[in-house]
Amino acid sequence: MTRGPTLPAHRLPHLPRPLDAFNTAPADEAHALLLHCLHSVRWSRRIADHRPYPDLESLLAAADEAAYDLSPGDLSEALAGESLPDLPEGTYSAAHMALSAAHAAYEARFGHAFVIYLGDTHPDECLDRILEAIRSRLTNDPEEERVMAAEELRRLAGERLGKLLRAAGPCPPAVPPRGATSQNAPAPGK
């Protein structure tokens, strides 16, 4: 029995990587993707306008550097687009109430949403880490907290951008679909 012809490995068709798609995307699509990562128009334009990037590490380094250059207005714009991190499914409603109260105190003091990078935190420890950080950061003066919030935003932007461009499939939409529910809602019956 003979087998039909096969395509040698070195002649397999090139499959585009997410970074290739980002590098060649129309400017408005690249801006939308970047706005999903950090809600600053100036930051997203700066990163998109410097395409193409030779590799993901170069893009992440450029995004990181650009985040250090956020003006006070850019930072306010980025903070306005943030919300509390999602809590793990099954979190008790009492935990949601505690988090809501702490976040309300934070917003009253600083005038913007609390932001925190949780990329290196085990899901079971997220709630404790968020509450501990809010309580700790409530003691900061406003300027010290803006610096801290900018650092957390920088780390969040890098994580979000890396996740989107390491993904094997299409990038998720920048905004949840209408009617989507938040994972921050208390688990039923809890």
Image (spheres, rainbow, N blue to C red):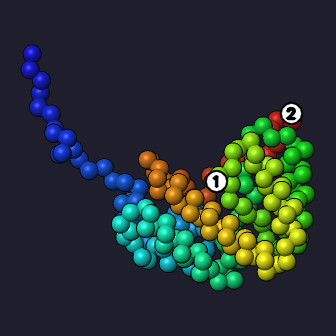
Side of 83 where 94 appears, left or right? right
Q: Residue at x 60, y 77 (%)?
A: 68
Q: Callout 2, which amino acid?
A: Gly
Provide residue 121's location: percent of width, then percent of height.
69, 49
On the rendered image, what quadrant is the N terminus found in? top left
Say what secondary structure mark 1 lies in.
loop
Provide residue 104's location: percent of width, then percent of height.
88, 63
Q: Callout 1, which amino acid?
A: Gly
Q: Nearer the viewer, residue 183 or 142?
A: 142
Question: Mark 1 highlights which residue?
Answer: 119
Q: For label 2, count other residues whose C-alpha is less than 10 Å away and answer few (under 14), some (14-19) or many (20+).
A: few
Q: Is residue 115 visible?
A: yes
Q: Residue at x 57, y 68 (%)?
A: 35
Question: Mark 2 highlights which residue?
Answer: 189
Q: Are marks 2 and 1 in contact (CB under 8 Å)?
A: no
Q: Is residue 44 above or below residue 18?
A: below
Say what secondary structure mark 2 lies in.
loop
